[in-house]
Image: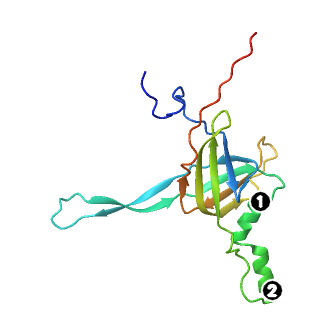
Amino acid sequence: MPTNTQFPKATYRYDPYSNYKFRVRRDGKYVAGISKVSALRQTKQVISHRADGDPSTPRRMPGQSDYSPITLERGVTHDMEFEQWANKVRDYHNSTADDQQGASGNQDVSLKDFRRDLILEVYNEAGQKVIAYTIYRCWPSEFTALPDLDANGNAVAIHVLKLENEGWERDTSVGEDSEPSFTLPAS
């Protein structure tokens, strides 16, 4: 029997992990109610160059990395966490209060803490953490407080938070564990 290199400890496993068991942590706490997280995507800019005497085909080399924004989605509730974080980047209420009072300095951006690291954890079907990524220096660039509303619809209202980031890295300390097994009771 060939060796299963995709799952070195769980050699009996052939199915990849499902995409529906995950959790997001911020500031050491799990963010409640996340129903969807977009893909972690990285692209490299391509630099083309050609020197004199080279053939007419340009050479290509990797340039800067670009990390696509990620989106978090969850149902609309009374939890203000997404909205408060989005307001740390630009708080209209604070900026207009400063303008009216003639205060020096602009308080509309919370420079100290509007960027935050997130941890995205993926779990197997048994609820064991199998993969984790740290997403660095995230900040909200777009927030949907309420979606389109439709009196004839049959859908859940969803908050959407779009997060810019400066890259991500897999947590290699999270490894593959032996998956649990159980014996059915005798009938």
Of residues 178 and 143, the one drawn nearer to the viewer in this rendering = 178
Q: CA distance from mark 1 to mark 2?
A: 28 Å
The mark lying in front, picked from 1 and 2, is 1
Quadrant occupied by the C terminus: top right
What amino acid is labelled 2 in the image?
Gln
User: Mark 1 or 2 closer to N-term?
Assistant: 1
x and y percentages locating residue 60 in the rendered image: 30, 59
Q: Which residue is mark 2?
A: 100
The image quarter containing residue 153 is top right
Q: Which residue is mark 1?
A: 81
* Residue lying at 46% horizontally and 30% vertically, measured from the top left: 4
* Residue lying at 17% horizontally and 59% vertically, measured from the top left: 55
The disc label shown at residue 42, or none:
none
The image quarter containing residue 1 is top left
* Residue lying at 75% horizontally and 48% vertically, measured from the top left: 33
The reply to whether the C-beta atoms of the residues labelled 1 and 2 are less than 8 Å apart is no
Label 2: which secondary element: helix
x and y percentages locating residue 175 in the rendered image: 56, 42
Q: Is residue 105 above or below residue 158?
A: below
x and y percentages locating residue 114 in the rendered image: 68, 68
